[in-house]
Amino acid sequence: TNASATTQGNSTTESGEGEGDKVTTVEEASLLRKLIHSKLVSTKADLEVLQKDPNSPLYSVKSFEALNLKKEILDGIYAMHYNTPSKIQETALPTLLADPPVNMIAQSQSGTGKTAAFCVTMLSRVNTNNPWPQCLCLAPTYELALQIGENVEQMGKFMKDLKITYAVRGEKLNRGEKLDAHLIIGTPGTTYDWALKFRFFDLKKICVFVLDEADVMIATQGHQDQSIRIQRGLKRDCQMLLFSATYDDTVMKFAQAVIPNNPVVIKLRREEQSLDNIKQFYIEASDLEGKFQALSNIYGSISIGQSMIFCATRKTASWLAEKMNKDGHAVALLSGELAIEQRAAIINRFKDGKEKVLVTTNVTARGIDVEQVTVVVNFDLPLTPDFKPDFETYLHRIGRTGRFGKNGIAINFIDGSRTYNTMKLIEKHFGRKVMKLDADDMEEIE
Ligand code: ADP
């Protein structure tokens, strides 16, 4: 299980749940996480080194100065307000920057600083006096490529003459043209055409090859193949790097195929979530109005920091958001028909505290962490596509990692024997009691 629990395969087809919700592909989920991770996701988990480079000992740095970076790059890093390396950067960067270059496979959840790490690497290895592409970074989609590009451009803004080009759909070059950009960021399809069909640049002159979001990459038919063919065209001593937010057999198989020569393999485990410190309740209410009444009582009687309310359908979610707004609560609605950028904007507003309540559907909010939420309401319990209790989603919504050891409250609505049974299965699965809450008497909750 992982941060991108959204889907397996190319796209999610959900049960009747988020009816009408647009299908969220793994690519979209990945972009959404990028857009809402404006800050580093901190972690206490230890970095695991699964495979070392026999020739160079692994060590870690506690500062960017210790890396002996070119001054322009260090200035760029500080201008981005990165003060110290993140957990993965501490260990990855010395190896990434070592000479002779070492290949690497690195996995850590989204938001932990992988992109920044390979941007530093590419910028460090580029020689802007040479007017040809020297670093090549592959990303699964147009949008993700642009996101990476934004990062490199910011970090490299003090390197004068640095030229970056995007090998993505819509970019047109003339036959016979030779690229003079130093860095290419692209999707596998266009990059493949540019390198191998039209020979706009020479793969043999690439000295850093980065394959980002490998787990997302392999979800798309063809990307795996194209990436491998591009990789086959590189020179033997090109530095090859692969990054992924998740780590499983399919990702590793692909990684091993595309990153040769005993790469260093590092992995940052995602912190376990648990239901310690979480008080779980259930409330019985037979219909929608009843649920709404109970919810009003809760919001009226206890002071709640920020909360999220999960509904099974878009219809319920928008109905509820409207009713709560009428009641004077500042409620935001995160709905599945919105474009990814709009969803990111809503989540970011909520993260900034502009609204205290976020109403969403079970499907839309899958995989999103909002750390400061203290109350989670399951207006409808999460179910798997075959209508079994979705334990993983339940835990992900409500659980905390050690670092957010704060107390939290979960409130589950039970509207019949079926949901009651679901709740009982959840109770049994986690071995934790879910206490009954009387909708007219909220004392126990505090
Ligand atoms: P990933 O590629 O693992 O998803 P990113 O490199 O995109 O992670 O970093 C996540 C967020 O943290 C971004 O907003 C990025 O600007 C920021 N960030 C990255 N490295 C650092 C650092 N050393 N210090 C502070 N912020 C950082």
Image: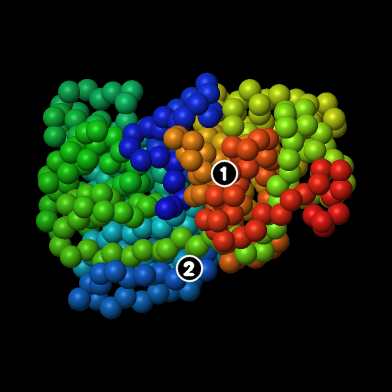
In which quadrant will I find the C terminus? bottom right
Q: Real-space Cα distance between discs 1 and 2?
A: 32 Å
Residue 344 versus residue 260 in the image, above or below = above
The residue sitting at 41% across, 69% down in the picture is 47
Decide if residue 411 is on the left or right side of residue 133: right
In x, y percent, where is residue 139? 33, 41
The residue sitting at 24% across, 33% down in the picture is 221
- Judge depth for marks 1 and 2 and give the one in front: 1
**SS of the residue under disc 2:** loop
Q: Amino acid at mark 1?
A: Thr
Residue 109 versus residue 162 in the image, above or below = below
The residue sitting at 44% across, 46% down in the picture is 4
Residue 16 shows up from this direction: yes
**SS of the residue under disc 1:** helix
The residue sitting at 33% across, 65% down in the picture is 266
Q: Quadrant of residue 189?
A: top left
Decide if residue 132 is on the left or right side of residue 8: left
Q: Which mark is residue 47?
A: none
10 Å crowding of disc 2: few (<14), some (14-19), many (20+) = some
Residue 179 shows up from this direction: no
Closer to the N terminus: mark 1 or mark 2?
2
In x, y percent, where is residue 437? 77, 49
Q: Amino acid at mark 2?
A: Ala
In x, y percent, where is residue 340? 52, 31
In x, y percent, where is residue 3? 46, 50
Residue that numbered label 1 is attached to: 422
10 Å crowding of disc 1: few (<14), some (14-19), many (20+) = many
Q: Which mark is residue 45?
A: 2
